[in-house]
Image (cartoon, grey):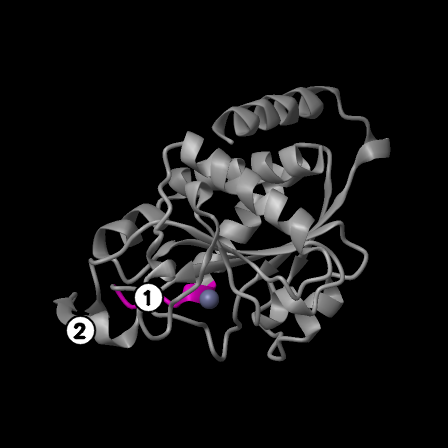
Amino acid sequence: MRRVSRIALALAWWLASTMSPACAALIAIDVGHYLEKPGAISARGRPEFEFNLDLAREIDTEIKSYGHKTRLIGDDGRIKELWRRPRAARGADVLISVHHDSVQERYLSSWRYEDADHRYSDMFSGFSIFVSRENAGWRKGLQCASAVGAALIKAGFRPSLYHADPVYGENRPFADKAHGVHFYDHLAVLRRADMPALLFEAGVIVHREQEITLRDSSEQKKMAASVALGIAACLG
Ligand SMILES: [Zn+2]
C-alpha cells in the first residue's frame, strides 16, 4: 500500500507539471458549519468554522495550482441546512468537506486562558478522514481519502485513529487504518452527495498544543498542499 501511495504521489506530481486545461476536474470544497452554529470550540475559545474557513481557502488555492477548478461551499457562513451542501456540489468530480475535530464530552477538562474559562482535552490529536458507504461514489471517495491520508503522512502529519475506539459515540471502523480513514456511513453531507465524497477532520482543536499548530498559517499551507496532492493523485 505504501509503495502504491508513493507511486500515486509521484504520478500526481508528474500530472501537475504536464496537465492541460482539458483534463481539469472540478473539486467542491465544503466549509463545515456556519456562523450561527460554528461547530466545536477550541481550547482557546475559537470557533471551528473559522479554522475550517482558513484551511478550505488554502486547499482551494493549492488545488487550483494543479490546474483543477474549484467551488467553495458555505464560505459565507450562511448555509444552515446540511442537504444544501451536497446539492451545491452537484456537477463536481469530488466533494471534500473540511472540518476540525473535538473529543467526547466526558474527556473535556477546564482551564483558564487569557482570563477566561475554556474546555480542552490533550488526550487525542491528529487528522481523520471519513467516507460513507451510502455515498454513491464511495469506492472512489475511499481511494481519494487514502491518497489524501498518504500525502499527509508523507508530509509529517499523523492520523488520530481514536474514532475507531470501541466506546460510545465512536466505533467508526477503519476503511484504511494506515492512512487514517474511517467509515462513517450516516454522515449527511457524504451520503447525499452524487459524487465521490470525503470528510476531512484536519486536527483536534480542543488539544492545546495541536490548536497552536492548526492556527499557524505555514502549517495550514503545508496541510492544504498535502490534501491537494492527494486529490490530484486520486483523480490522476
Ligand atoms: Zn465539524
Say if 37 sits above or below 155 in the image.
below
Q: Secondary structure at mark 1?
A: loop
Q: CA distance from mark 1 to mark 2?
A: 34 Å
Residue 74 percent location from the top left of the image: 62, 66
- Residue nearer the viewer, 145 or 66: 145
- The residue range painted magenta reads 44-49
Q: Is residue 13 left or right of residue 55?
A: right
Query: In this rendering, does residue 68 appear at all?
Result: yes
Tell me whether the residue at label 1 lies in contact with that at label 2, contact meaning CB atoms closer than 8 angstroms.
no
Q: Is residue 149 magenta?
A: no
Q: Hey, what amino acid is under mark 1?
A: Pro
Say if 97 sits above or below 227 in the image.
below
Query: In this rendering, does residue 221 appear at all?
Result: no
Can you say which quadrant of the picture contains the C terminus?
top right
Dot placed on the residue nearer the N-terminal end, 1 or 2: 2
Q: Residue at x 21, y 71 (%)?
A: 108
The residue that label 2 is drawn on is: 116
The residue that label 1 is drawn on is: 166
Q: Is residue 77 left or right of residue 212?
A: right
Q: Residue at x 51, y 24 (%)?
A: 3
For discs 1 and 2, the disc positioned in front in the rendered view: 1
Q: Is residue 48 magenta?
A: yes
Q: Residue at x 21, y 63 (%)?
A: 121
Q: Is residue 215 left or right of residue 7?
A: left
Q: Residue at x 45, y 38 (%)?
A: 152
Please tell me how crowded label 2 is: few (under 14), some (14-19), or many (20+) other residues with Cα within 10 Å. few
